[in-house]
Amino acid sequence: MRKKVGLLVLFMFFSFMLFGATTGMSFGEPEYDDMDGYILENAQEETASNNVVTSVLLEYRSLDTLGEATVLITAILSVVVVLRRFAQ
């Protein structure tokens, strides 16, 4: 019984993976959005940065970047705490 359930779960997993791979957007063909043009045209004047990527990360999406950094630091600290217990 366990083997059948395991095979069913494995089949469902690979079905979802295949569905996601075949129905997704093609690489290198992103949809153009009006916001893309706005950022490319106005990033230097609004943020005083010569690098558009830097201006997007640090000015337009700064709170999102801060959240991602917080998640990474929390994960690293959790791994350090767990490994520290095993080292003693």
Image: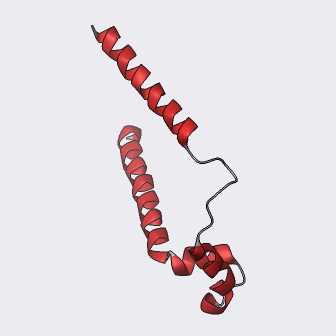
Count of numbered badges drawn on the protein = 0
* Residue toward you, 68 or 37: 37
Q: Residue furthest right?
A: 50
Q: Residue at x 70, y 78 (%)?
A: 51
Rendered image coloring scheme: secondary structure
Q: Residue furthest left?
A: 1
Answer with left or right where residue 56 lies relative to residue 85: right
Q: Residue at x 41, y 40 (%)?
A: 87
The x and y percentages for residue 67 are 42, 67
The x and y percentages for residue 54 are 64, 76
* Residue toward you, 1 or 67: 1
Answer with left or right where residue 30 lies relative to residue 60: right
Answer with left or right where residue 43 lies relative to residue 77: right
Vertical comparison of 43 with 19: above or below: below
Splitting the image into 4 quarters, where does residue 12 fall?
top left
Quadrant for the C terminus in the image? top left
The x and y percentages for residue 13 are 43, 28
Q: Residue at x 50, y 74 (%)?
A: 61
* Residue toward you, 88 or 31: 31
The x and y percentages for residue 76 are 45, 54
Vertical comparison of 42 with 11: above or below: below
Quadrant for the N terminus in the image? top left
Q: Residue at x 52, y 31 (%)?
A: 18
